[in-house]
Amino acid sequence: MEEIIDRIFGFMPEKGVLVTAIGTMVIIYAFQYGITKINELLKLPWMKEENQKQRKQILQKTKSENQS
């Protein structure tokens, strides 16, 4: 049993490499989360989805009125 565990852990990199990789991953996800939140806050009104739906409804309404 110990041989199997030693073989499995034998392929793993050293502790410092793992800590660096995990730390880098956390930093990347934090920046990604922050950037997406900033993009949502700074979105122009016409870019928001609810405003897009309203715009489509208004355009359809005006088209139908113009065709009638």
Image (spheres, helix red, strand yellow):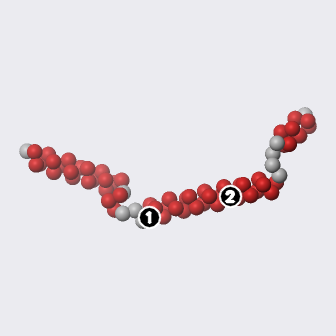
Earlier-in-chain disc, 1 versus 2: 2
Q: 8 or 58, which lies in front?
A: 8
Task: Name the residue carrying label 2.
Answer: 24
Residue drawn at x 66%, y 55% is 25
Circle 1 SS class? helix
Circle 2 SS class? helix
Image location (x, y in percent) of residue 44: 36, 63
* Of marks 1 and 2, the one in the foreground: 2
Res 10 → quadrant: top right
**Quadrant of the image containing the C terminus:** top left
Residue drawn at x 36%, y 53% is 49
At label 2, the amino acid type is: Thr
The residue carrying pointer 2 sits among few (fewer than 14), some (14 to 19) or many (20 or more) residues within 10 Å by Cα, namely: few
**Quadrant of the image containing the N terminus:** top right
Left or right of residue 14: residue 2? right
Image location (x, y in percent) of residue 30: 60, 60
Left or right of residue 13: residue 61? left
Task: Name the residue carrying label 1.
Answer: 41
Left or right of residue 68: residue 39? right
Residue drawn at x 71%, y 55% is 22
Q: Is residue 34 depicted above or below 9 in this figure?
A: below
